[in-house]
């Protein structure tokens, strides 16, 4: 576990360095069979200026023309952004949505990605992403992924079709992890929808669930027991249960009672440490990332309520002006 000062110092340096790079947003209108919706193939400069791909989907214009509230969607482990047709829930409800690739990931669930990860390997790892660069916070894979997520929020908020005061992050599993990280690290997020977040409340690495992608951490600890303490210390800066203690926007958390991957107790830990207005919904019989229509309805109700009471952004914990 890291002190508040260590977390603040690390994330201030990381995000101030990233902010020196222009977002360099590029949009190309993309033809789809959707009637009335406008779809853009988007790319922007993420961590180190690497290009990150996304879809921006705008709902049909209606009586209430003007900037729309927006959800920024983050994806589960191994998924790419797929096709715009895969992500129509929020546009159907009248929201703009930005569906963001996770660097280097593609193919899970049949959803292809369009974003490379050009960062090289600096030490032995097990296959996958969760141990890439794990011996040093400055080189860890999720450092760049979190920076990408923060900058994706800025891309959404900066689009003239989006109401910058009504941007929410959303995702499940790894997507929930990234949605929560972005909500804590970015001052622009007005609400977060966090389902079964990955990389939360991490125990000793030899005790993580033997399920992907936690299995990668387990195999690393087994293969490199002498390096496991260094890896654990790095993970403390990215554990979203630790970051949750610095949350400042309303958040809806969801926990699946039979989740054998992102265990229910880790989701409860994240929720319990989150100090801002929050709601927890639990599904005692649900498994990991199972289809859940009642949850989608709860999320829609939660966002509609939060967005009717939109408040000015509050500085993130690492920024000057944050009330500690």
Image (cartoon, grey):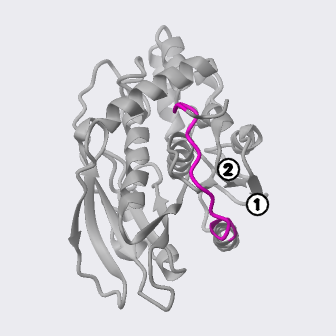
Q: Main secondary structure of the magenta part?
A: loop
Answer with the quarter of the image where residue 60 lies: bottom left
Q: Residue drawn at (59%, 37%), measured in percent from left and top?
A: 240
Q: Picture coordinates of residue 79 (x, y %)?
A: 40, 55
Q: Residue 259 carries which label?
A: 2
Q: Picture coordinates of residue 132 (x, y %)?
A: 37, 28
Residue 269 visible in the shown view: yes
Give SS at disc 1: loop
Give SS at disc 2: loop
Answer with the quarter of the image where residue 20 lies: top left
Residue that sits furthest to the top in the current view: 226
Q: Picture coordinates of residue 262 (x, y %)?
A: 63, 44
Q: Residue 40 carries which label?
A: none
Name the side, left or right, on which 114 lies relative to 157.
left
Point out the image quarter for the N terminus.
top right
Answer with the quarter of the image where residue 121 lies: top left
Name the side, left or right, on which 50 lies relative to 17.
left
Cα–Cα gap, marks 2 and 1? 9 Å
Point out the image quarter for the C terminus.
top right
Other residues around mark 2 within 10 Å, as few (<14) / some (14–19) / many (≥20): some
Q: Earlier in the sequence, mark 2 or mark 1?
A: 2
Looking at the image, residue 32 lies above or below residue 287:
below
Q: Residue drawn at (23%, 42%), measured in percent from left and top?
A: 50
CB-based contact (under 8 Å), mark 2 and mark 1: no
Q: Is residue 306 magenta?
A: yes
| Camera-side residue of 104 and 323 | 323
Q: Give the range drawn in magenta.
A: 305-320
| Camera-side residue of 292 and 300 | 300
Q: Residue drawn at (67%, 54%), measured in percent from left and top?
A: 251
Residue picked out by circle 1? 285
| Camera-side residue of 206 and 300 | 300
């Amino acid at each position: 576990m890291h002190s508040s000062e260590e977390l603040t110092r690390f994330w201030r340096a990381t995000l101030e360095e990233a902010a020196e790079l222009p977002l360099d947003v590029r949009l190309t209108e993309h033809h789809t069979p959707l009637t009335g919706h406008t779809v853009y193939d988007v790319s922007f400069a993420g961590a180190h200026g690497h290009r990150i791909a996304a879809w921006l989907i705008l709902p049909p214009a209606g009586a209430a023309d003007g900037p729309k509230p927006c959800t920024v969607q983050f994806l589960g482990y191994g998924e790419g952004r797929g096709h715009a047709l895969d992500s129509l829930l929020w546009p159907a409800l009248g929201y703009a949505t930005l569906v963001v690739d996770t660097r280097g990931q593609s193919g899970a669930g049949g959803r292809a990605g369009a974003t490379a990860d050009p960062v090289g390997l600096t030490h032995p790892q097990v296959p996958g992403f969760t141990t890439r660069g794990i011996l040093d916070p400055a080189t860890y894979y999720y450092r760049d992924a979190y920076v990408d997520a923060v900058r994706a929020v800025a891309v959404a908020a900066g689009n003239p079709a989006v109401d910058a005061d009504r941007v929410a992050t959303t995702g499940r599993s790894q997507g929930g992890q990234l949605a929560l990280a972005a909500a804590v690290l970015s001052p622009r997020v007005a609400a977060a929808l966090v389902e079964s977040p990955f990389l939360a409340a991490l125990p000793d690495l030899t005790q993580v669930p033997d399920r992907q992608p936690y299995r990668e951490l387990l195999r690393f600890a087994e293969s490199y027991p002498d390096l496991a303490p260094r890896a654990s210390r790095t993970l403390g800066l990215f554990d979203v249960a630790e970051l949750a203690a610095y949350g400042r926007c309303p958040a809806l958390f969801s926990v699946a009672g039979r989740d054998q991957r992102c265990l229910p107790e880790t989701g409860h830990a994240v929720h319990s440490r989150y100090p801002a207005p929050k709601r927890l919904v639990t599904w005692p019989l649900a498994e990991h990332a199972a289809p859940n229509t009642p949850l989608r309805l709860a999320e829609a109700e939660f966002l509609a309520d939060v967005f009717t009471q939109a408040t000015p952004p509050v500085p993130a914990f690492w920024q000057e002006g944050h009330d500690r």
